[in-house]
Image: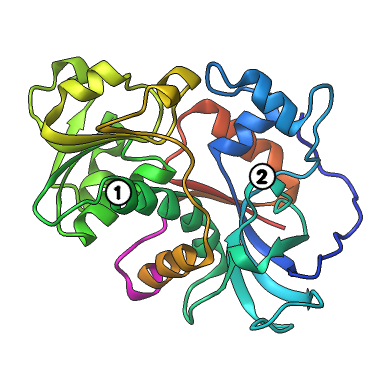
């Protein structure tokens, strides 16, 4: 069970910066790691990576925003006092007052961007951008179906599809239809009324952000040259992801984070925050993640 405890301040390596965390995202990834609830087939690999009998990463949290407290001996381009954001990958550690992060995954915060918005958008924004642009090579005018359009990745995906000039259909539940429409969706499908099996339209890209679209179902929804994107895939799907099916982790690079934060600063991307709370309320935030009903992003503010 997640809880608040006193831990030592991390020591940055030579190519790390020590950051005073102002905000960090609490994501479905944090929930999976905490509960050892990995996609089917990845249980053993997940246990080996994050701990067999006890957590190997005692502090969760990947996406962060804060201020540089100190820099490693080989760090260039960052100075004490700089506002920065980034992601700490499997090292985690951002659900704390301080986190040590590699400069290769850290970028300056644009003027006017709040720490809460930055922390909220980094995970979903970078994941959505990676799949849509890098994996699908999305072009203006193409049609995209976003399954899970009200989640962290989904809310970013809807906006990025529009930013890239494509046509987006969002799949969500009844309470989130207005939100998904306001984010720019050209069409919205309420899955409580029309399940995926009832969709007859074909799309150039089908982007599953929640992990409930199998490969045969996804391919049935594609045009002849369409691409199926699986942001959350089990082992069998990952192995079977070839040809027009794309799966696997999104890359975490500072230049991608900088682009996402730049879109946030320009107003082309909006951070959707379900709830922001102090570190003392971290249990409540994890409970919200586990409910499967969060809208957009959860943010903890140490």
Q: Is mark 1 on a helix, strand or loop?
A: helix
The spot of residue 232 in percent (x, y) is 44, 31
Circles 1 and 2: CB atoms closer than 8 Å? no
Q: In this view, does 262 lie above or below 29?
A: below
Task: Find the distance from the CA under tag 1 to the CA under tag 2.
Answer: 23 Å
Query: Which corner quadrant holds the N terminus?
Result: top right
Q: In this view, does 154 lie above or below 160?
A: above
Q: Is residue 243 left or right of residue 24?
A: left
The one of 152 and 227 positioned closer to us in this rendering: 227
Return the residue at label 2.
90
State the predominant SS element of the stretch in magenta.
loop
Q: Is residue 103 above or below residue 182?
A: below
Is residue 265 magenta-colored? yes
The spot of residue 114 in percent (x, y) is 52, 70
Q: Which of marks 1 and 2 is nearer the N terminus?
A: 2
Q: Quadrant of residue 116?
A: bottom right
Q: What stretch is highlighted in magenta?
A: 264-271
Residue 183 visible in the snapshot: no
The spot of residue 253 in percent (x, y) is 52, 61
Residue depicted at 36% across the width and 69% down the height: 263
Q: In which quarter of the image is residue 295?
A: top left
Residue depicted at 45% across the width and 17% down the height: 236
Q: Is residue 231 left or right of residue 268?
A: right
Q: Is mark 2 on a helix, strand or loop?
A: helix
The one of 5 and 64 positioned closer to us in this rendering: 64
Q: How is the image coloured?
A: rainbow
Are there few (<14), some (14-19), or many (20+) residues within 10 Å of tag 2? few
Q: How many marks?
A: 2
Residue depicted at 68% across the width and 82% down the height: 76
The one of 247 and 37 positioned closer to us in this rendering: 247
Return the residue at label 1.
132
């Amino acid at each position: 069970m997640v809880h608040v405890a006193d831990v030592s301040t991390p020591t940055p390596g030579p190519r790390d910066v020590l950051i005073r965390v102002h905000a960090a995202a609490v994501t479905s990834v944090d929930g999976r790691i905490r509960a050892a609830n990995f996609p089917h087939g990845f249980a053993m690999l997940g246990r080996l990576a994050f701990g067999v009998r006890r957590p190997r990463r005692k502090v969760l949290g990947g996406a962060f925003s804060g201020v540089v407290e100190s820099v490693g001996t080989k760090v260039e381009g960052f100075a004490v006092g700089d506002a920065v954001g980034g992601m700490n990958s499997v090292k985690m550690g951002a659900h704390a007052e301080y986190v040590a992060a590699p400069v290769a995954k850290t970028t300056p915060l644009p003027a006017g961007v709040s720490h809460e918005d930055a922390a909220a958008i980094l995970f979903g924004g970078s994941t959505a951008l990676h799949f849509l642009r890098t994996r699908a090579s999305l072009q203006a005018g193409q049609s995209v179906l976003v399954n899970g359009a009200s989640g962290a990745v989904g809310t970013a995906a809807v906006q990025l599809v529009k930013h890239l000039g494509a046509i987006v259909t969002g799949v969500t539940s009844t309470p989130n239809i207005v939100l998904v429409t306001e984010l720019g969706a050209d069409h919205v499908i309420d899955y409580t009324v029309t399940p995926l099996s009832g969709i007859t339209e074909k799309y150039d890209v089908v982007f599953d952000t929640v992990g409930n679209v199998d490969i045969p179902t996804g391919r049935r929804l594609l045009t002849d040259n369409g691409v199926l994107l699986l942001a959350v895939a089990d082992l069998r799907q990952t192995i079977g992801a070839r040809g027009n099916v794309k799966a696997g982790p999104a890359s975490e690079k500072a230049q991608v984070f900088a682009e996402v934060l730049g879109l946030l600063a320009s107003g082309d991307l909006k951070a959707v925050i379900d709830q922001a709370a102090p570190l003392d309320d971290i249990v409540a935030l994890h409970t919200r993640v586990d409910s499967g009903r969060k809208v957009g992003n959860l943010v903890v503010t140490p």
